[in-house]
Structure formats: structure tokens, C-alpha cells
Image (cartoon, rainbow, N blue to C red):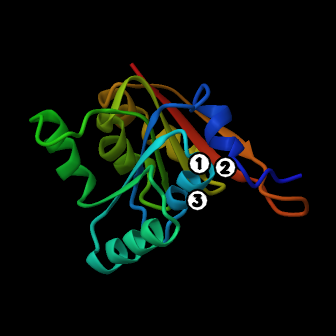
């Protein structure tokens, strides 16, 4: 049975998420970022998206849904990494980084793992090739201080194929 009040795959695989900071990379259509922010009001969500029209739509969603825990930033991941490194603004490394259909793990490791605080976790929704992507990206994951890369299946709904989720911890 689906619990509409929380996204089990994020909560379950991030060591309990209450009170944590979550960054959704490439938020585009709002999943998982907008949905997760709506379901988990006790977490602070930041959604980054480089395309202006998508940013405008995401901001409309946050405003229309009155999501007090959602912030939208028009930026690419590398720009946010630089802002965190140079202490620009209020951005700090995040507890959890999520993404869906952004890029293969060979690129995603460098775009997401530097955004995590130590002991943070990447939660990346991927397809059936998730394990093969991890194998190809071992060097990039390690270089970005990622450890324990693994794939778990996240049930979607009865009768539907599970989603493959890549989890990577940050040293």
C-alpha cells in the first residue's frame, strides 16, 4: 500500500530524514523534489534547475502549494558546488542529494557528491542499468569521495515495476 504522506525510499535510505537538508538536482518536472517537499514538511528542500521556464514553473508549484520548506534556485550543479566552496550566500553542503534522469553515474558523481556534507547520501533514481552505471563510474565515485555505491529497488505501486535507486554515501 502506498503511503501518500511520505516517500519511503528517501526516508528509508537516508538514515531517517527528519530535520535534514535535501537538494534535488535537475528538478525540472518536480519529481522527486516538489513531491518530496510536499510529503516531508520537516525537511528543508532546495531544488536546482538551470532552465528558466522550468524554474518559473517550479516556483509556481511551491507558491501554489504554500511549501514553506521549498527553495528554488536557477543554477547548474557546478555553480552550486562553487557557491558552497566559496561560502557564497547561505548554501552549505546538504544531508541528502536526490535526482532523477539527470545523467549517467560517470557524470552524476561529480555533479552531486561534492554537494553533500560528510556522511551525506546521494539518492539517485535510475533505470535497470543502475548496477552497470555504478561499475562504469567506480573511479568517478571514489574521486568525489563516494563510498558504498549500491542499488536498491523501491516499490512504486502494486502491479508496477520497482524503481532502481542508486545510493552512494559520502566519506
Q: Nearer the viewer, mark 1 or mark 3?
A: 3
Element assignment for label 2: strand
Q: Quadrant of residue 156?
A: bottom right
Say the numbered circle drawn on residue 83: none
Say the numbered circle drawn on residue 164: 2
Q: Which residue is pictured at 31% across the width and 38% down the height?
A: 115
Q: Nearer the viewer, mark 2 or mark 3?
A: 3
Q: Earlier in the sequence, mark 1 or mark 2?
A: 1
When the figure is inspected, residue 29 is found, relative to residue 48, above or below; the finding is below
Q: Which residue is pictured at 62% across the width and 57% down the height?
A: 127
Element assignment for label 3: helix
Q: Which residue is pictured at 45% across the width and 49% down the height?
A: 69
In front of the other: 14 or 128: 14
Q: Quadrant of residue 171?
A: top left
Q: Residues within 10 Å of mark 2 (few under 14, many from 20)?
A: some
Q: Residues within 10 Å of mark 1 (few under 14, many from 20)?
A: many
Mark 2 and mark 3: Cα distance apart in space? 18 Å
Number of numbered discs on residues: 3
In front of the other: 136 or 123: 123
Q: Are marks 1 and 2 in contact (CB under 8 Å)?
A: yes
The residue at which mark 1 appears reads as: 130
Mark 1 and mark 3: Cα distance apart in space? 23 Å
Say the numbered circle drawn on residue 35: 3
Q: Earlier in the sequence, mark 1 or mark 3?
A: 3
In front of the other: 103 or 32: 32
Amino acid at each position: 500500500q502506498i503511503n501518500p504522506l511520505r516517500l519511503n525510499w528517501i526516508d528509508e535510505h537516508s538514515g531517517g530524514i527528519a530535520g535534514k537538508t535535501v537538494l534535488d538536482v535537475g528538478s525540472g518536472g518536480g519529481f522527486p523534489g516538489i513531491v518530496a517537499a510536499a510529503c516531508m514538511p520537516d525537511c528543508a528542500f532546495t531544488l536546482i534547475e538551470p532552465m528558466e521556464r522550468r524554474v518559473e514553473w517550479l516556483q509556481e508549484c511551491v507558491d501554489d502549494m504554500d511549501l514553506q520548506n521549498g527553495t528554488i534556485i536557477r543554477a547548474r550543479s557546478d555553480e552550486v558546488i562553487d557557491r558552497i566552496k566559496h561560502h557564497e550566500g547561505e548554501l552549505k553542503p546538504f544531508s541528502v542529494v536526490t535526482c532523477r534522469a539527470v545523467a549517467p553515474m560517470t557524470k552524476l558523481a561529480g555533479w552531486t557528491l561534492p554537494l553533500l556534507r560528510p556522511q551525506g547520501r546521494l539518492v539517485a533514481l535510475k533505470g535497470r542499468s543502475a548496477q552497470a552505471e555504478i561499475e562504469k563510474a567506480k573511479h568517478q565515485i571514489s574521486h568525489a569521495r563516494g563510498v558504498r555505491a549500491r542499488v536498491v529497488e523501491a516499490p512504486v505501486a502494486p502491479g508496477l515495476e520497482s524503481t532502481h535507486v542508486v545510493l552512494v554515501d559520502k566519506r
